[in-house]
Amino acid sequence: MNGRIGLLSNNWKISLYLLPAIAITLLLVGYGTWSAVAQSFQTIDGEWTIAAYAELFSSDAFFHSLKLTFRVAILSTLLSLVIGLVMTRLLYQLFKDSTWKLLVWIPMLIPHFVAGYLVFLFLSQSGLLSSLLYQIGALENRANFPVLVQEEFGIGIILTYVWKEVPFVILMLLPVYYEIDHRYSEVVRTLGGSNWDAFRTVELPWLLPVLIETSVILVAFVASAFEIPYLLGVTRPEMLPVRAYEWFYNGDWSKRPLAFSAMILPGVIALLLATLSIGAVQKHRLRMIKGRSR
Amino acid sequence: MRLFLKGLGKRELATSFMLILFIILFILPFITIGLKSVSVGWRWPALLPNGLSLDAWRSIMKDPKLIESLVTTFKVAFLVVLLNILLAIPAARALSHYTFKGKSIIEGLLLSPILIPGILLAMGLQFTMIQFGIADKMIGVVFVHLIPTLPYAIRVMRAGYERMGSSLYEQASVLGAGLFTRFFTIALPLLLPSIRSLMLLTFVISLGQYALTAIIGGGTVITLPMLYYPYFSSSNDAVIAGFSILFALLPLLFIGFVEVMMRLVIRAVNRV
């Protein structure tokens, strides 16, 4: 299509198109990260030191927070993926219709903290589920209702994330489901394979890249989001973003290096996870392309 | 044949079960908080409110801080959406229609704002923003709101460009249409659904930011979430419910507004 002159101008065009977005991203992420790392290694007087890290790694509270943060992140991601996948699989025909697809968009419309309020409204000890159980006689007293929000394991936080991310997972998976040639599933069934076989051999290869991308986004998001744990968490142990925010804001500036170093570790873990899994997907994609004789 | 029908029935049963579950889980809560916001004295263990009243809405609407923050929120979100459109459309065009050296690195870089903790970036940027005088101002808040929105905006637009393909574009360019004619007569109409999704998504994400706004806004840029948290610890359930409904209504209001504006512009353009 493009002549020889076209090629040269194409390179210019690509750079011009990408430049604004790249510049902004470099400024926000590149400079932001550098500045955060630098400040984690400095005292407020500007002296270089590893005191903040030494203090973090010697405190049990930090490791409790780290454990809680990643437990919540991984559990809510896995649950959202499984539920989202099952719902997409059963409902994708229905969601082709744009009026039904609006249903999926509705939960996406509200901010996370409002979802947190919903979980509180329905699942707290004096919530609506507890009322319902009392009315049908399954519960004698609201104190008998299990503590699901504002407790140490983070159940309320996990449930909020699952509620909010299942529609996100569905919206990520739907385009893939429309792309899959479902006649292959018929072939698997005709040859005597089960539903599971059809899923594993036909759908999974298509889904895997998106599933991994989605899970990386979700783990990174949950591990660093402040809004829900601030609303539904307890003070001991706190999730890391809340701890970091409080170090950053409350009290004196001498705690600021701690705030930075406390968020750098989950950042590094999330980044490693992303690089590893995206590398794995690249390999898988290459194999898929080679396997096809188009 | 009988076996086939039986199999079909089972699948349809599962589908309708899933649909009902979906509606109970994701739609019923909205109806509940809607009801809650106009209720009085709905306490444990009642399943339905004792009475109805608009008191909560009245006290929400009377709060002068709320009206002010509503305006701030809209201004911030509007600018965030606009910047996202301007940045994402050209970037998505380059990523969807061209292959070039180092493309995967660029893709990784553009995705990085949602992989690196936003709260860390905001904390890191704060001191510099103070030095440049844009912290504690709306422009600084708009700027950090690009962190959680831009990667999604690019993604949505890229999918739109990929669906569109390049054949129509090439036809137009063969027929001698310039860059702007091609964009406004072919790309824009075909990309409208993606642009709508982009606007809704980035508006909603901007609307939901508490930590980033608090860190950069420093308590002087008061968006709605800044008020929501204090409300949450107050005791009036109906008021919190009303406030929550407000958060769900704003994106709809925004998209309605955008839709009307777009129709007007299109009509004006057609007349010319």
Image: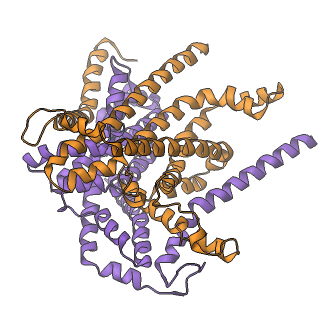
Chain colours: A orange, B purple
Q: Is residue B89 above or below residue B262?
A: above
Residue B25 seen in the current view:
yes
In the rendered view, does A98 fall on the left or right side of A194?
left
Query: Residue B45 appears at what percent x and percent y?
Result: 59, 79
B81 shown above or below B176: below
Along the line of sight, which residue is nearer the eye, A8 or A151?
A151
Left or right, A131 with respect to B98, comes to: right
Count every numbered label the image shows and give the total.
0
Q: Is residue A97 left or right of residue A244?
A: right
Quadrant containing the N terminus of chain B in the rendered view = top right
Any part of residue B176 in sight: no
Provide residue B236's location: percent of width, then percent of height: 40, 79
Where does the image place residue B240, in percent across and percent down from the top left?
41, 73
Observer-nearest residue: B30 or B269?
A: B30
Toward the right, the furthest residue is B2
Where residue B47 sits, quadrant-wise, is bottom right
The residue at 23%/50% (across/down) is A247
- Could you tell me which residue is drawn at 68 percent across and 53 percent down? B18
Front residue of A125/A226: it is A125
The residue located at (90%, 41%) in the rendering is B3
Position of B111 with respect to B45 (left or right) is: left
* Residue drawn at x 41%, y 38% as measured from the top left: B155
**Residue B173: which quarter of the image?**
top left
